[in-house]
Image (cartoon, rainbow, N blue to C red):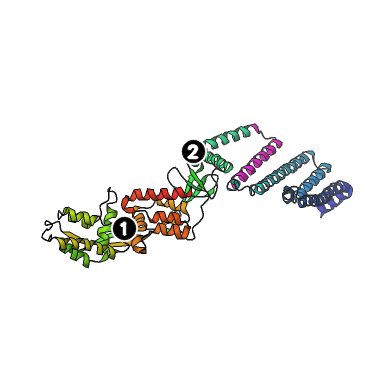
Amino acid sequence: MIYMLAVVDWLRIHWLHVVWPLLAFLAAYVVGLWLRRLLRKYLQRLGETGKWEGYVIVWQVIKTQVLVWFLLLGTYIATYISIIDRSLKSLIGKIIIALFIVSVTWVIARFVEKLLRLYLAKEERLKPSEPLIVNIARITVGVVGALVLLDFLGAPTTPLVVLLAVAVLVAALAFRNVLANLLSGFQLVQSEHIKVGDFVRLESGESGYVADINWRNTQIKALDGNVILVPNNRLLQGTVINYGHPLKQACEPFRFYSRLNLKELTGLKARNLAELAKGLREVPGSVIYYHTHNFLEEHHYLTPEPANDFALWISDALGNEALGERVASIDTFDFSTIGALRTRIVGVIEEYLSKKNDNKRTAPEGREFHFIKSISVIIPTAYIAHDLREFVEVLRKISTNSLYYHMFDSKLRLQKGVNDFSTWVTDCVGDSDLGERLAYLDPYNYTMENLRSTIIQLIEKRIK
């Protein structure tokens, strides 16, 4: 009670020393509200005229801080005209100015961030680097603001600047690869030699579409669906073939398959031509397939390729080179069905037997002809081609089993005398001329790798 009476007596005597600081604070607050309203109308009007989009950003950033600044100003004036101790006035004044520096630093950082995002959003080339650029700008403004604040408070800033420089140097050495990738990424974006959506082939032989270019690496989506991450520095220093944007897409993508051939002994065997002809008439079509098509695939590396297993046995085991040559002259790939191929082989052998009694010629023991059945297992691969460029890139990667399936087995499967490649190019890509060239390729005249190279060359000539 006595304390309250003392306060009342002090206020009665020194009321002006309280009223004037309070009036100064309120006046600063009112002026702040008034100027804030005027500033809002002015900036909104400028923003609506479209002279500069940044006016809207300025208002978004300072609309709250303007009032804070005037409150700090009112507090500073009230403190200055009050009767409190001079040393306390100095301390409060330093605190107010320090808060003002922090507020201004925050406003500048926010303004720079929003302004950068506004302009970077319009530059497709710089979009991948937007987070990095914005963070660097914010850190820079923060460091400058911190140095100004420390200098105002009387802290020695020279050692801090030196320490900061040393820290930057150490960081540059420690993260030199990161910096190299950053600079390389910026150069890639600015030069536009490689852009998102381009189809590229790397020095390592990998290929795909550029999915993203960020500050550390470039993401390439390969044709098998995998994503390849290439450091920007390596991409810039290495040899990269850029084919540009995709070609006209096919109405349906081409899905690559492969197949494995298992073999199974039937238990049937032949010792002479009569038994061979009889066996050929009775065995399943998979046996004929194994000793013709599959035989060629297994010996694709030989030049010229041997014709079929039957001709080889007749020449080597029976020593009948004349008939062996006649059976070898049968072009396996002229027949669109196994049944037609079987009829032709049996016909050549029986015609020979009808003219010459050569049934006494028997294979030595251990060299009988064993009929083997082929069992095919079809396997889907990860590769899908949507246009001719993707198609030719996949051709470089697929196995010979896959190539054989689409080029050789397809004739038997489609029974049209064409292959999967020519059918897709004609029907889905709409290039009948290229499709016809692929259809009339005679695989019998090539090894598998030569056939692959020939197809690639035909397609590359068309897409250049």
Sort mark 2 into few (<14), some (14-19) or many (20+) by Cα contacts within 10 Å.
Answer: few
The disc label shown at residue 397, or none: none
Q: Residue at x 33, y 51 (%)?
A: 448
Name the one closer to the observer, 406 or 438: 438
Residue 209 percent location from the top left of the image:
50, 50
- Type of amino acid under label 2: Gln
| Range shown magenta | 131-158
Residue 334 percent location from the top left of the image:
31, 59
Query: In the figure, residue 256 lies in which quadrant?
Result: bottom left
SS at mark 2? Answer: helix
Q: Does residue 370 appear left or right of residue 205 in this picture?
A: left
Sort mark 1 into few (<14), some (14-19) or many (20+) by Cα contacts within 10 Å.
Answer: some
Name the one closer to the observer, 53 or 242: 242
Please determine whether, in this image, residue 105 is positioned above or below residue 312.
Answer: above
Residue 216 percent location from the top left of the image:
53, 44
- The residue identified by callout 1 is 333
SS at mark 1? Answer: helix
- Type of amino acid under label 1: Phe
Query: If you read the primary sequence from the N terminus, does the residue marked by circle 2 or circle 1 appear first?
Result: 2
